[in-house]
């Protein structure tokens, strides 16, 4: 049976950005990740092995967010690729990364990028 496992509102202090000050002082980021998966029958019998463990999913996202990058597109792509590699039952993944108070020369609560990948 198909279904989705999602983590929403993950918060990180990370060092992503084009400008040197962004990469030295960092910024607050939010990540949402949704994975379409094929649930195994064991998941409906209360067995974690039949689904995607969201603690493992969080750890994967955290590791990728710790790697400085200029573009959020690059980070989102890396997360999506790792999810599809790590979780055999994953069918597709959508990753949304938001940067709070981006340096755009005006008021903006957050800027976001969404990356989708299909296995």
Image (tube, grey):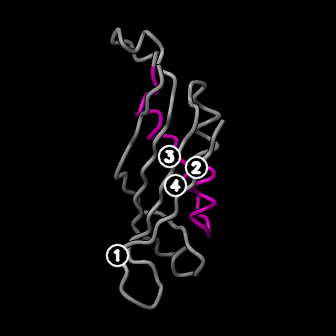
Of tags 1 and 2, the one toward the viewer is 2
Q: Residue at x 47, y 66 (%)?
A: 112
Highlighted magenta segment, given as a residue range:
51-79
Instruction: Tell me if residue 92 comes above or below residue 97 in the rendering.
Output: above
Kindly identify which residue carries mark 3. 61
Q: Along the polypeptide, which appears first: circle 1 or circle 2?
A: 1
Residue 35 placed where, x, y %?
A: 49, 37
Q: Earlier in the sequence, mark 3 or mark 2?
A: 3
- Kindly check if marks 3 and 4 are in contact, taking CB atoms under 8 A apart as contact: yes
Q: Which residue is mark 1?
A: 109
Secondary structure under tag 1 reads loop
Tell me the CA gap for discs 4 and 1.
20 Å
Mark identifier at residue 116: 2
Quick one: label 2 or label 4, which is nearer the N terminus? 4
Front: mark 3 or 1: 1
Residue drawn 52% across and 81% down? 21
Mark 4 vs mark 1: give the one in front: 1
Tell me whether circle 3 and circle 1 mark residues in contact (CB < 8 Å): no
**C-alpha distance separating marks 2 and 4:** 17 Å
Position of residue 103 relative to residue 14, above or below, is below
Q: Local crowd at mark 3 within 10 Å, few (<14), some, or many (≥20)?
A: many
Q: Residue at x 37, y 51 (%)?
A: 10
Structural distance between the alpha carbons of marks 3 and 1: 22 Å
* Mark 1 → mark 2, Cα distance in angstroms: 23 Å
Q: Picture coordinates of residue 46 (x, y %)?
A: 33, 12
Mark 3–mark 2 distance (CA, rounded to whole Å): 15 Å
User: Which residue position holds label 4?
Assistant: 65
Lower sequence index among marks 4 and 1: 4
């Amino acid at each position: 049976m198909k279904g989705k496992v999602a983590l929403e509102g993950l918060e990180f202090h990370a060092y992503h950005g084009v400008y040197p000050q962004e990469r030295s002082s960092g910024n607050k980021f939010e990540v949402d990740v949704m994975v379409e998966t094929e649930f195994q029958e064991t998941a409906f019998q209360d067995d974690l092995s039949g689904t995607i463990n969201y603690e493992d999913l969080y750890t994967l996202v955290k590791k990728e967010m710790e790697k400085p990058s200029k573009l959020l597109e690059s980070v989102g792509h890396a997360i999506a690729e790792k999810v599809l590699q790590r979780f055999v039952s994953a069918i597709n993944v959508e990753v949304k990364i938001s940067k709070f108070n981006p340096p755009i020369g005006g008021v903006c609560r957050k800027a976001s990028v969404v990356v989708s990948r299909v296995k």
